[in-house]
């Protein structure tokens, strides 16, 4: 089976691409077949971190049906065994307007990729594409900087993601689903309350939709102050969004990250002993364990 993991954030520039590229490399080194997909429709740039400046084939070729199969846009690397990569598209207008059918075709194609782990960089923000790509996965990672604005943006991102998840769970129950779809919600509680008003017992069903949604938290460019902010945020998220966000780890501020960016080589490869690389390795180790648990739980007895 393939375990799908997406990475997202409320605010841009929190370090998602840096994290996911290094995670992809580190997981591939454990012998897993890993596929990294750059679904940041507005600002795909993961290819740059691999030194691929003008990839021959990108996601655009698949989206515009220049190629029929998603396999035709998968890149492999001579130096990174076990790693597959689908570069994102630079064509922002065309892909930002992805229709429902096109999005379904893309998600179906992603599900068909042969890999042990599928990693998805969904980019920043709360547009429907970012939220849907984030929620499409089995596991989610969210990255924030320690400052209050980033944390607030992450809170908003998770709030909208949970609302979308809950609304999505009603799609098959048409009357409640259609009724709720026509409302513009700003808080999860509003969804719960209106769902219950529409039909008794629906609130419990809505809450159930979030039972397995526990996005894993990474605080990047970590400093001494972040401990307090993190604690406050987790408390707020647990109270108002009814979800727990387990900590995956922190990554310190590290100049080696920018240095590695300038040489187009992931930091774990170029400076494996740097503080950032050591934190990324610890995070990859935890993710590897979670993947193992997830795969085991999903295997029928
Ligand atoms: N721990 C760190 N220490 C120092 N610099 C960092 C660290 N993490 C990320 N950076 C730098 O921050 C910048 C943004 O990183 P990155 O592109 O990975 O963010 P992003 O979340 O993917 O951004 P976007 O939302 O635009 O896609 C890069 O220049 C990167 O080198
Ligand atoms: Mg990015």
Image: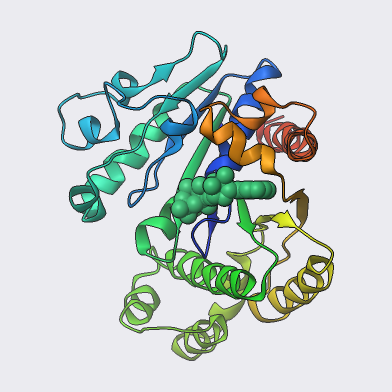
Point out the image quarter for the C terminus.
Answer: top right
Q: Residue at x 73, y 80 (%)?
A: 239
Looking at the image, residue 296 sits to the left or right of residue 143; the answer is right
260 and 110: which is toward the camera: 260
Q: Residue 138, can we see it?
A: no
268 and 151: which is toward the camera: 268
Q: Residue at x 29, y 30 (%)?
A: 58
Point out the image quarter for the N terminus.
Answer: top right
Q: Residue at x 81, y 71 (%)?
A: 231
Q: How is the image coloured?
A: rainbow
171 and 183: which is toward the camera: 183
Residue 297 in picture, x, y percent from top left: 72, 37
Residue 105 in picture, x, y percent from top left: 27, 40
**Does residue 253 sit above or below 168 in this rendering?**
above
Residue 178 in picture, x, y percent from top left: 32, 76
Residue 188 in picture, x, y percent from top left: 55, 80
Q: Residue at x 55, y 83 (%)?
A: 192
**Does residue 6 sit above or below 113 in this rendering?**
below
């Amino acid at each position: 089976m393939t375990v799908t993991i997406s990475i997202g954030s409320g605010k841009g520039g929190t370090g998602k691409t840096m994290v996911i590229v290094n995670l992809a490399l580190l997981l591939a080194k454990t012998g897993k077949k890993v596929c990294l997909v750059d679904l940041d429709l507005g600002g795909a740039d993961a290819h740059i971190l691999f030194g691929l400046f003008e990839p021959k084939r990108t996601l655009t070729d698949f989206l515009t049906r220049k190629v029929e199969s998603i396999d035709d846009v998968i890149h492999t690397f001579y130096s990174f065994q076990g790693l597959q990569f689908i570069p994102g598209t630079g064509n922002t207008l065309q892909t930002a307007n992805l229709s429902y059918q096109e999005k379904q075709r893309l998600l179906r194609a992603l599900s068909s990729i042969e890999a042990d782990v599928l990693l998805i960089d969904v980019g920043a923000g709360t547009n429907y594409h970012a939220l849907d790509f984030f929620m499409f996965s089995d596991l989610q990672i969210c990255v924030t900087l320690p400052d209050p604005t980033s944390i607030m943006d992450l809170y908003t991102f998770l709030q909208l993601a949970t609302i979308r998840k809950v609304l999505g769970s009603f799609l098959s129950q048409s009357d409640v689903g259609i009724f709720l779809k026509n409302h513009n919600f700003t808080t999860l509680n509003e969804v719960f309350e209106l769902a219950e008003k529409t039909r008794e017992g629906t609130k419990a069903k809505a809450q159930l939709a979030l039972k397995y949604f526990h996005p894993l938290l990474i605080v990047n460019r970590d400093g001494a102050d972040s401990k307090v902010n993190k604690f406050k945020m987790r408390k707020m998220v647990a109270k108002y969004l009814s979800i727990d966000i387990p900590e995956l780890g922190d990554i310190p501020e590290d100049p080696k990250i920018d240095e590695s960016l300038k040489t187009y080589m992931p930091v774990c490869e170029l400076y494996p002993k740097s503080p950032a690389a050591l934190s990324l390795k610890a995070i990859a180790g935890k993710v590897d364990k979670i993947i193992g648990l997830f795969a085991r739980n999903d295997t029928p007895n």
